[in-house]
Amino acid sequence: MYCRKILILFLAGLVLVTAPGCASRSKTPSPYELQERTSAAHADFRKLITVEIADPARAAIFAGLADERDALMVRHSESVRTYAESMKTLSSDYSATREDFEKLVRDYDSDRRGFQAEFVGLIAEMKAVTTEVEWRKLSKFDIDALGPQASAISTEGN
Amino acid sequence: MLAALLVAFFLGGAAASGALLTEDMLKDFNHRAEQVVVDPERVDAITKEVASLHDELKAFNKALAKSGKSLDAYYKDHGADAAGMQTELDALNSAWVAAQSRVLDHRFNIRDQMTPDEWRAVFADK
């Protein structure tokens, strides 16, 4: 869920902003491919939690924190999408004032800082409920599972 | 890389900054402006502002990538505390706000070179 939601958001972002004829578009997996890939990664991650964290109680807590992180990402993805749409609308409006833009940026920044603080707190809790070895393997999975998509996004976003 | 992705996510990534103008969109914007604005002096002024805006976006993308690496390290390090990660994000947030302000300067400089009709024509099917 975690990976899938992030990637869906990013895909939406790319669709939103990528100009026609972008040379790097072909590097981006299709929505179906992303869905398949990230759903599989999500299932694998859940399996990995139970394999790496032998203590069922800690594994359950960790899985719960991962769920909270998923939910946070979903909520924030909606916030990002709303901000992007508002910014697009303002950008195209000749009569939009500087204050209109600044208010939007200010409000979004404040909103985002709240999400970030919550996210950082969740990561800290996830670390706290795992040993160093467990965290190394679980976090490595996150990174490896998202690597190819992250590269594609980086190409598009730049 | 995951942290870099998360940073981009939290900062709105391509979606949010791109709504103002991404590097890809800038090329398209400049091309459209050249077609719509007939006065060579104004076209030249717009092109210069677009180039400056492009530089601004590139500079921020570099800062984003650098922070992403730092956050990757915090993320992977079991012993790293939340405060370090938060400090890195706070710094990036501030850099983003400052960059947005400079981007806005360029956006309004560009707008001031165009009439309302020209502006509407450039954004016609956006």
Image (cartoon, coloured by chain):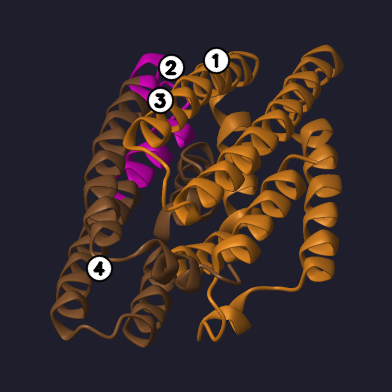
Chain colours: A orange, B brown
**In the image, residue A114 above or below residue A2:** above
Task: Give the SS element for disc 2.
Answer: helix
Residue at the location (84% across, 56% down)? A40
**Residue depth check, mark 4 versus mark 1: number of the one nearer the observer:** 4
Q: Which residue is disc 3 drawn over? A: A106
Quarter of the image with the C terminus of chain A is: bottom left
Tell me the distance, in whole angstroms, between the alpha carbons under discs 4 and 1: 39 Å
Residues flagged by tags 1 and 2 on a common chain: no
The chain carrying label 4 is B
Amino acid marked by disc 2: Ala
**In the image, residue A10 above or below residue A133:** below
User: Which stretch appears magenta?
Assistant: B66-86
Amino acid marked by disc 4: Val
Residue B85, position as x, y percentages in the image: 39, 25
Residues flagged by tags 2 and 3 on a common chain: no
Tell me the distance, in whole angstroms, between the alpha carbons under discs 3 and 4: 24 Å
**In the image, residue A22 above or below residue A89:** below
**In the image, residue B115 above or below residue A28:** above
Q: Is residue A67 visible?
A: yes
The chain carrying label 2 is B
Q: Nearer the viewer, residue A24 or A85?
A: A85
Answer yes or no: do the residues labelled 1 and 2 have beta carbons within 8 Å? yes
Q: Which residue is disc 2 drawn over? A: B82
Residue at the location (52% across, 17% down)? A114
Circle nearer the N terminus (4, 2): 4
Say left or right for A158 vs A72: left
Circle 4: is it few (<14), some (14-19), or many (20+) Cα within 10 Å? Answer: many
Residue A12, position as x, y percentages in the image: 68, 57
Residue A121 is labelled as 1
The chain carrying label 1 is A
Task: Give the SS element for disc 1.
Answer: helix
